[in-house]
Amino acid sequence: MILLVYPALKNGIETSEMKRIGIKIRLRKEEINFMNICELLESLHVLNESERLYKEYYSVQNHPEQLKDFLKTIDPDFLAENHLIIPDIVDYHSSYFKEDMFFIEDKSQDIMVMKHNCFSPLTPHKHSFFEMLYVLEGSCDHYINDACFHMKPGDICIVSPEIMHQLGVFDESIVINFLIRSSTFEEIFFSLLKGDNILSSFFLNNIYSKKINEYITIDTEQDTELRDLLLDIMLEYIDRPLYYIEIMNSELVTFFAKVLRRYEKNCHLPPFTKKRDVQSYALVHFIRENYRTVTLGDIAGKFHYSDDYASKLIKSATGYTFTQLHTKIRMHKAAGLLKETSINLQDICDDIGYLNPEHFIRMFKKEYHMTPSEYRKKNKH
């Protein structure tokens, strides 16, 4: 994942295309937004310094003498400063990227947006966050473990945390990367997760389970409204005006909601290849659907397991004991009610199956490091 963040674009600049057709930028808000997207599109077509270097490296890889001369011109310090990889100079096998390696400029950011560098070498890697790839123009080959997917304009692939993958863009196609924190995903995107749909299942199964769904692919059929919504998120990230983080989060939820409204039939999860994955998915789904009163005995009875086997399978699939997972799911439901409604604490306890409000408060504080009332105040709209 060799990436570059574009510098901020300034309002009030005419692009060459605008000049050609005689359009003048006016200062009304909606036109500024439109023009900024035009400027962004124009800038994305220009290869940056890193891409130019990679393009030259790509062109000489099969010419030993030219490659030798090229490598002599490379400054290793430049590679290190820009996080670039030339395998003939830097030995590269695979890398693991943590959230704190990327989300460093503003600790409160939940989303990062950047263009994938064209011509960058194939670099197998995995990370602790979700990564969404969107093909704006052209095409690319996306390798996930042993599978290869050819992606075309409008295609999206969301890769789960901890999944090895690599992207091949060996022409001037434009692919945009959206990096999404997994540590705060549940809190920020609660309104998306509370629905019964393929996207909420994908994200929640990755939050609560281990590698049940490695990725999800979506064909948006080159929907221009969805394209412009993603470009607007990118503009917010680049310009960073007041409340840009809140707007980016809100627009990404809107994007996912519109994807579900129009193209849920085009959302595809990989088929399960192991019986244990099927069992794990079914167990987690059953607990989520029956969170209010479910017991380990209920699970064992539903799937015809012994209590001991059901307990071991849950631990293996999620990393949590049944009690820990059940509590985590109920606390998530409570957090949503605190954030989205004004119902009182007793009613929330009743809704998630807690008879003792004091016990609920203790468990909520353990999960979110604040009391329910503090959480509601913090997340008040």
Image (tube, rainbow, N blue to C red):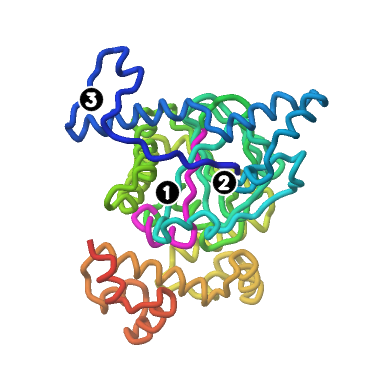
The question of residue 15 being in magenta is answered with no
- Cα gap from disc 3 to disc 1, whole angstroms: 42 Å
Residue 150 visible in this rendered orientation of the protein: no
What secondary structure is marked by label 3?
loop
What secondary structure is marked by label 2?
strand
Q: Mark 2 points at which residue?
A: 215
Q: Which of marks 2 and 3 is in front?
A: 3
Give residue 212's quadrant in the image: bottom right
Q: Mark 3 points at which residue?
A: 25
Kindly identify which numbered label has been placed on residue 197.
1
Q: In the shown orientation, is residue 37 left or right of residue 182? A: left
Up the image or down, 155 lies above or below 159; here it is: above
Q: In which quadrant will I find the C terminus?
A: bottom left
Nearer the N terminus, badge 3 or badge 1? 3
Residues in magenta?
Answer: 175-192
Q: Nearer the viewer, mark 3 or mark 1?
A: 3
In the image, what residue type sits under mark 1? Asn
In the image, what residue type sits under mark 3? Ile
Give residue 89's quadrant in the image: top right
Q: Position of residue 176 (x, y in %)?
A: 49, 37
What secondary structure is marked by label 1?
loop
Q: Which residue is drawn at 61% across and 73% down?
A: 311
Q: In which quadrant will I find the N terminus?
A: top right
